[in-house]
Amino acid sequence: MKLDSAVFLTRIGITPVESKGRRENMRAGIVGLPNVGKSTLFNALTSSKAAQSANYPFCTIEPNEGVVSVPDGRLERISRYIVPKKLIHAALRLVDIAGIVKGASEGEGLGNKFLSHIREVDAILQVVRCFEDPDVVHVAGAVDPISDIDVIEIELMLADMQTLENALPKAERTAKSGDKEAKLRADAIRKCLDHLGTDQPLRKLTLDEQEAAAISSFGLMTAKPILYVANVDESDLAGKGPLAMKVRERAAMVGAGMVPVCAKLEAEIAELDEADRAEMLAGAGLEEAALPALAHEAYRVLGLQSYFTAGEKEVRAWTIPVGATAPQAAGVIHTDFEKGFIRVEVYTLDDLETYKSEKEIRAAGKLRVEGKNYIMQDGDICHFLFN
């Protein structure tokens, strides 16, 4: 059975947000212990030139948010044949969440407030310190990336357990009245609690569609997909050093993603103009900054893909979940497009590079007309027709 985008979003505890007819970008929360480089990385990724955070815990009290473009070379390739006034890349919303410490689930270090911010995001980017620096204190007194990962995981699991334990009595009381939805919710809660009791995060638990929907409103944090961002030293940009390799091995063991990033270097690069950025990257032996690799891996972790619209006004990438139908993809542009969807005309970038224009693609019979049941493919170039 196909997994459409609504089911996908429900499975990972996401409720699509709509604003003025358009769905909001997916939000990824940057989390970690204090002083691991979260805010430095956030400022670099969002090209912020604000002063870096002070070297002590809890310097970020409210979550900062920024929207970053997701680089995609296919836009430039499309624009060689359909010349637009502007190119618009897909976007990812990043949320810089204040440092989590041991005991956060019990309110330590304003933990309850910070954990509530994590409940509101769609995926977790955990920054893990993989560098030694005597001038940057570690909250635990020593650099140990696996210990850091475990601290965050345990606190999120404990917080999820509290959420479920608090919700269970009400669900059980309502279920006794014969409410089928409440019974399903109570069963799903007990299933989750049993799983958490084995010290495993909820992302490792398989729920059916009804079970996932029954508890989707809880914003369970360990059900969210996770990506480990190893904050490495400038001497280990490839993330092959012993500290980064520990993170790489843990990610492989739990089925998570891992991207090595030197936040300090990225912050310096972000302060430069384009020409100087290229020179500094070359000097560091890098072909590009960390954003492309991080954004693409975050896309993969979130289960996202892009499709394109192309015309003289703009060539644009749009973000959709893998498995989205054509009407759901149209709804990303505007909800009215989904409601009034009639059909979509689709062709590929390979078609465009072979036949050089939409007119020739159509003449060659390569322009496909798809209906409401069409499952969008990554890289589709589309014209939507709607009522």
Image: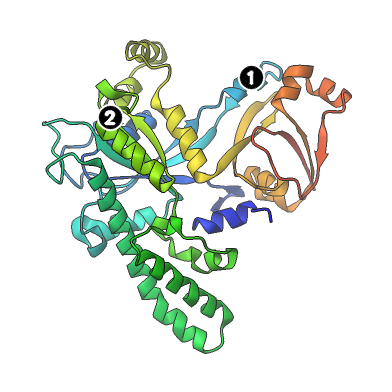
Numbered disc 2: secondary structure: strand
Residue 272: x %, y % from top left: 34, 17
Image quadrant in which you'd find residue 103: bottom left
| Residue positioned 42% across, 59% down in the render | 202
Image height of 69 relative to 210, above or below: above
User: Which one is earlier in the sequence, the residue at label 1 or at label 2?
Assistant: 1
In the image: residue 242, left or right of residue 227:
left
Going by the numbered disc 2, the residue's amino acid type is: Val
The image's mark for residue 232 is 2
Whether residue 273 is visible here, answered yes or no, is: yes
Image quadrant in which you'd find residue 230: top left
Tag 1 near tag 2, CB within 8 Å: no
Structural crowding at the residue carrying mark 2, measured as other residues with C-alpha within 10 Å and reported as few (<14), some (14–19) or many (≥20): many
Say which quadrant the N terminus sits in. Answer: bottom right
| Residue positioned 39% across, 70% down in the render | 194
In the image: residue 70, left or right of residue 136:
right
Whether residue 15 is visible here, answered yes or no, is: no
Going by the numbered disc 1, the residue's amino acid type is: Arg
The image's mark for residue 77 is 1
